[in-house]
Amino acid sequence: MQIRHPERFALHKLIVGDRRHGGPDQAEARKDRGQAAFLISILAADRPGDLADALEDAVSRGPRWRQRISASLAHMPDTAEILSKPA
C-alpha cells in the first residue's frame, strides 16, 4: 500500500485518535497515536517541510481540528516537541 500524502495521514491519525469513543486510553486511540508518532518521527527527518506544511494546513481548518490535534499531542510529548520545531 502506498500513502499519497503520509504527512497528512499522520495528522489525520492524531485527529482520529482523539475522536475514538471510549476516550484517549482506549486501545484503538493508543494505536492511532502510535502510528502518528512513528510517521511523524520519520517525516520530520526525511520531509520536514512537507510535514510543517501539512500541520499548518490542518490547524488552519478551524478550532475543532486544532483542539483534536492538541488533545492527542497532550498524550505524546515527544511528538509534540518534534512538531514544534521549525522545518
Image (cartoon, grey):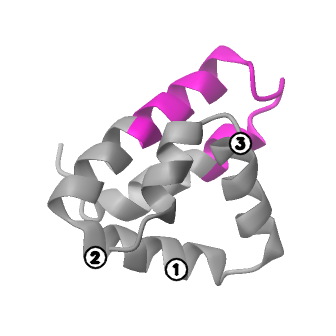
**Mark nearer the N terminus (3 vs 1):** 1
Q: Which residues are magenta?
A: 15-37
Main SS, magenta residues: helix
Where disc 3 sits, the SS reads loop
Q: Which mark is residue 74?
A: 3
| Residue 46 position by quadrant | bottom left
Mark 3 / mark 2, whichever is N-terminal:
2
Q: Amino acid at mark 2?
A: Gly
Query: Do the numbered discs 3 and 2 sit on residues whose CB atoms are within 8 Å?
Result: no
Q: Position of residue 57 (x, y in %)?
A: 52, 81
Mark 3, other Cα within 10 Å: few <14 / some 14–19 / many ≥20: few
> Percent position (x, y) of residue 7?
35, 61
Residue at mark 2 to residue at mark 1: CA–CA distance: 10 Å
Query: Which residue is at the front of the view, 1 or 33?
Result: 33
Q: CA distance from mark 3 to mark 1?
A: 18 Å
Question: Which disc number belongs to residue 49?
Answer: 2
The type of residue carrying mark 1 is: Glu
Q: In this figure, which residue is indicated by the disc labeled 1?
A: 56
Picture residue at 64% right of the left edge, 46% below the top = 73
